[in-house]
Image (cartoon, rainbow, N blue to C red):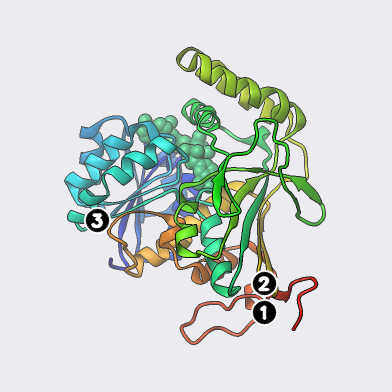
Amino acid sequence: MSRSPTVLILGASGNTGSRIARLLLAEVPEARVVAAGRRSAPLEALAGQLGERCTPLSVDASSRASMEAALRDVDLLVAASSTSEFVDVAIEACLATGTDYLDIQLSAEKVARLFAASDLFEAADLCAITDAGFHPGVPAALIRYGAERVPGAFRAQVSSVIQIDWRGLEIVSETAREMVREFADYDSKHLVEGSWRSMSWTGRGSPRFDFGPPWGEQVCVPMFLEELRPLPQMYPQLTSCGFYVGGFDPITDYLVIPLVLVGMKLLPGLLEGPLARLLCWSLRRGSRPPFGTLLRLEVQSEREQLVLQLGHEDGYDLTAIPVAAWLLQWADGSRPLGVSTMAQAVEPARLLGDLQRMGVRVSPPMEDSPPSPDGTAQPPRSDPAPGAGG
Ligand SMILES: NC(=O)c1ccc[n+]([C@@H]2O[C@H](COP(=O)([O-])OP(=O)(O)OC[C@H]3O[C@@H](n4cnc5c(N)ncnc54)[C@H](OP(=O)(O)O)[C@@H]3O)[C@@H](O)[C@H]2O)c1
């Protein structure tokens, strides 16, 4: 891929898409962005801010004709829109126009449909990346990073705190509906003693992780992500691993989310809209500082442990920055053909160095160590495991 790609960002007026557009133009000076979505006014306003390398375009993700027309002369489609239900249209349009693909949505059905089309992407010499962002997107990349640096690691877990100030955010109704479908899709599998197990419905036995002040210790529940699936085959000694998320606020966690889960099981067609509005109301009502989003990696072997924490005060920046960091690798020619998750496609050490450079707090910082001969950032030192000899 050349360093002067044209990238169409679907959902460019959205919370995440606008940040990806801004970062891509800053990070890849020769790149051009087509800022796409249905409403032209916010896209024109964005293009006005971002300058001549950004062109606004009205596109509807549900229409194959609209998508195909938009993707002519485009190198990559970035689906940063709440349009996972139209993934088939995106797949067909990318294959028909010879366009690489990337999405940031969380949807088991979307992932299944993409992987079913992997041979078609490969035969067309195209790279399709799914589940980009921070979660999904970063957890399995962190585990790969840790498992390579801690030989014999038997446990590698990534936990997360997500405290967003929902009160100031505009969330389009499709995004709110997609959020309740994501909850309905929730899969609590994590790897325990070598086998994938689901959490009990009471949540009993959920682990606690200490995120340090001001967050402290938090109970987190396991959340399966497609990017985790290959890890036991990649690292056979790894018998415990998973991704774990903390809660929002007590009313959302213990009242609204259970209502969403039950409602989406019983009458999804009828209740999706009202439940989406209820969820947004509850998230806004429960928004309390401190705000911030964290990812914490803990890796353990018999002899040592490695802990690494990533943080940003803005959860949408923490979503867009990993996408931009991957796009740098893509623009440099890293284009696995067929379908891959971002966390499996990305080179983890370079990802971490770029995240830090783009404003993610990495603790301990990557620059503590000298750069490696190949120019990638060096890992933080791992410490002897408590009680480990030697
Ligand atoms: N991987 C991660 O870490 C991560 C983190 C956060 C969010 N996400 C996902 O990212 C996606 C976007 O989230 P967000 O919060 O940024 O959403 P948002 O601010 O509500 O923006 C959604 C965007 O999608 C566009 N859109 C909706 N339907 C469309 C259609 N039919 N055709 C074209 N564009 C359409 C909207 O523009 P118009 O209304 O003008 O069309 C809008 O620009 C969601 O799927 C969310 O789940 C992923």
Q: Is residue 197 above or below residue 52?
A: above
Query: Callout 3: few (<14), some (14-19), or many (20+) C-alpha neighbours within 10 Å?
Result: many
**Helix, strand or loop for disc 2:** loop
* Picture quadrant of residue 166: top right
Determine the CA span between mark 2 and mark 1: 6 Å
Asked if the residue at tag 1 contacts the one at tag 2, i.e. Cβ–Cβ closer than 8 Å, the answer is yes
Pick the front one: 46 or 17:
17
Give the x, y percent position of residue 282: 68, 25
Residue 39 can be seen, yes or no = no
Amino acid type at circle 1 is Asp
Upstream in sequence: badge 2 or badge 3 = 3
Determine the CA span between mark 2 and mark 3: 35 Å
**Helix, strand or loop for disc 1:** helix
Q: What residue is rendered at 18% in x and 47% in y? A: 97
Q: Is residue 251 left or right of residue 136?
A: right
Give the x, y percent position of residue 199: 63, 38
Pick the front one: 303 or 32:
303
Residue placed under numbered mark 3 in the picture: 126
Q: What residue is rendered at 60% in x and 67% in y? A: 356
